[in-house]
Image: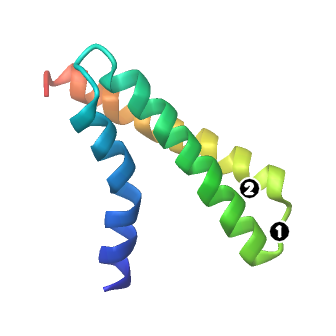
């Protein structure tokens, strides 16, 4: 149940950006919204874990955007 809730919570903002923005703005706005979400989750996890906040936010942002880039490129490669 917690995995389901986490998935829905993490997917809701990118999904809404894809649904509500026009085709020419979908990808850029989704990237921005995901980047902000990654920063937010990095901040929250660092606060809860009493870890350095800046490092957690940067690590979460870089790994998340890298993952999103690879996924996008694989999709382009296979014309998905």
User: Which element type, helix, strand or loop, lies under badge 2?
Assistant: helix
Q: Is residue 69 visible?
A: no
Outermost residue on the front side: it is 20
Q: Residues within 10 Å of mark 1 (few under 14, many from 20)?
A: few
Q: Quadrant of residue 21?
A: top left
The structure residue drawn at horizontal position 71% and vertical position 50%, both measured from the top left corner, is 57
Scheme by which the image is coloured:
rainbow
Q: Which residue is mark 1?
A: 51
Quadrant holding the N terminus: bottom left
x then y, percent, for residue 16: 29, 44
x then y, percent, for residue 18: 27, 35
Q: Is residue 3 above or below residue 63?
A: below
Q: Which residue is mark 2?
A: 56
User: CB under 8 Å between callouts 2 and 1?
Assistant: yes
Outermost residue on the bottom side: it is 1
x then y, percent, for residue 26: 31, 25
The structure residue drawn at horizontal position 40% and vertical position 71%, both measured from the top left corner, is 6
The structure residue drawn at horizontal position 62% and vertical position 54%, both measured from the top left corner, is 40
User: Which element type, helix, strand or loop, lies under badge 1?
Assistant: loop
Q: Is residue 61 visible?
A: yes
Q: Which mark is residue 22?
A: none
């Amino acid at each position: 149940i917690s995995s389901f809730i986490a998935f829905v919570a993490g997917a809701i903002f990118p999904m809404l950006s894809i649904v509500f923005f026009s085709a020419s703005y979908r990808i850029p706005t989704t990237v921005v919204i995901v980047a902000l979400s990654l920063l937010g989750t990095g901040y929250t996890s660092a606060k809860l874990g009493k870890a350095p906040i800046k490092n957690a936010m940067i690590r979460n942002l870089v790994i998340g955007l890298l993952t999103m880039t690879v996924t996008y490129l694989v999709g382009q490669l296979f014309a998905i």
